[in-house]
Amino acid sequence: MPVGTAARLRDDVRATGADLVWNPEFLREGHAVQDTISPDRIVYGVAADDPPSSPSPDPSSSASPAGDAAGCGAAARSVAVLDEVYAAAIAAGTPRLVTDLATAELVKTAANAFLATKISFINAMAEIAEVAGADVTQLADAIGHDARIGRAFLNAGVGFGGGCLPKDIRAVTARAKELGRGESLRFLEEVDAINLRRRERVVGLVVDALDGSVFGKKVAVLGVTFKPESDDVRDSPALDVAVRLKGLGAEVVATDPQGIENARARHPQLLYTPETTEALRHADAVVLVTEWRAYRDLDPVAVAEIARGSVVVDGRNVLDRAAWRDAGWTYVGMGRP
Ligand SMILES: NC(=O)C1=CN([C@@H]2O[C@H](COP(=O)(O)OP(=O)(O)OC[C@H]3O[C@@H](n4cnc5c(N)ncnc54)[C@H](O)[C@@H]3O)[C@@H](O)[C@H]2O)C=CC1
Ligand SMILES: O=C(O)[C@H]1O[C@H](OP(=O)(O)OP(=O)(O)OC[C@H]2O[C@@H](n3ccc(=O)[nH]c3=O)[C@H](O)[C@@H]2O)[C@H](O)[C@@H](O)[C@@H]1O
């Protein structure tokens, strides 16, 4: 939601006798239950002019500018209700922050924007690694050991997709412009552009590996969802790569453990099979774009026996490149030799 939405809705909601608090959640698809039961933090946004009367159980965890102020209005009651909802998580020591409405709205957007920026940062470094002859996975490991940076969300590859990160960076960029601060978040347009370039890059690597043209070549695309453990194909880099290859004249056969139905509804022009072996059979090139466990664990020797060609493009940098090369494959990674 654009920052300012809660404040705009609040009076209308209160006129009904209810209260409006902003309680963003940070769950990831595929981990929804675990993330809901054990969140990293809980955030309640309450109206700044009606602060909660009771301090939070752990005052050091409250970021409310008015969290300790007197008052026993609707916001205080809402905080008490939410404390009941999250009683188990709070008792387990989950940090709980009470903020104003706008801050709570921005927390959600800022978290996703930061995650997207981390991914595009490492993908930008992958672009440099590609021309410098460096290895972006080793680079990520090395900088990730710095606790201030951290290794999470530094996996370079075909980039981020899904129903949240792409939408949220575009939405907050647009909102910043509305608020007269477009320059503050202009870098997120670059984050978006870097991300979209990675899809082109995967396609380009396939074309190059097939001597300049995919026309008439069979390409096995492993994965259509935006990430493993989800059937979601919204803004999926994997599906985008499949569609682009098809547009260049390749005979694309895509496979996925969970996403075929959703992918077919959006792109019926592609061929799909739930059988990995069928996708790989007589393939001139194999492209891994969603790092499902089943694809990470593929035996390169066995795949070589059913495929026609010997090109594998690892769009997620998850395959054991030495094992694939030993089995006779031309292995192509993303930002690593
Ligand atoms: N998917 C996730 O893991 C998380 C999603 N969110 C946020 O929650 C929101 C919903 O996300 P999802 O559940 O993934 O999306 P979704 O696309 O699965 O669900 C959205 C629902 O809203 C309905 N809808 C859309 N426009 C509407 C309108 N104008 N009037 C009435 N209904 C309308 C759609 O039909 C759909 O049922 C998004 O803002 C997302 O950023 C937040 C945290 C996690
Ligand atoms: O707002 C939301 O709805 C949610 O958006 C994301 O969750 P989600 O979209 O489920 O997926 P992520 O696990 O964040 O992955 C997003 C994309 O980034 C990609 N990614 C992730 C990590 C990485 O290192 N590299 C990378 O390319 C994934 O493949 C995927 O396409 C956030 O992680 C959640 O905290 C948030 O609640």
Image (spheres, rainbow, N blue to C red):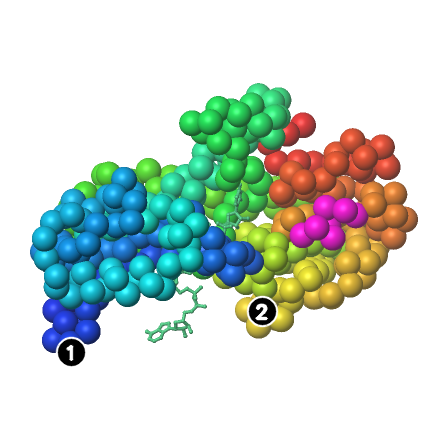
SS class, disc 2: helix
Q: Residues within 10 Å of mark 1 (few under 14, many from 20)?
A: few
Check disc 1 and report the residue beneath it.
16
Residue 173: in magenta span: no
* Residue at x 25%, y 43% (from the top left corner): 59
Name the side, left or right, on which 199 lies relative to 282: left
Specify the farthest residue to the bottom.
16
Name the side, left or right, on which 313 lies relative to 179: right
- Residue 138 vs 211, above or below: the answer is above
Location of the N terminus (image quadrant): bottom left
Residue 235 pos. (x, y %): 49, 57
Residue 296: in magenta span: yes
Name the side, left or right, on which 178 lies relative to 251: left
In-front residue for pair 268/83? 83
Q: Which residues are magenta?
A: 292-298
Q: How many marks?
A: 2
Check disc 2 and report the residue beneath it.
262
Q: Is residue 129 visible?
A: no
Q: CA distance from mark 2 to mark 1?
A: 39 Å
Location of the C terminus (image quadrant): top right
Q: Which mark is residue 112?
A: none
Name the side, left or right, on which 225 lies relative to 177: right
Q: Which one is closest to the eye, mark 2 or mark 1?
A: 1
* Label 1 within 8 A of ligand 1 by Cβ: no
Residue 78 pos. (x, y %): 23, 64
* Residue at x 41%, y 39% (from the top left corner): 117
Residue type pointed to by label 1: Thr
Q: Image quarter for residue 8?
A: bottom left
Residue type pointed to by label 2: Asn
* Residue at x 76%, y 42% (from the top left corner): 311
Quadrant of the displayed image that contains ligand 1? bottom left
In-front residue for pair 222/34? 34
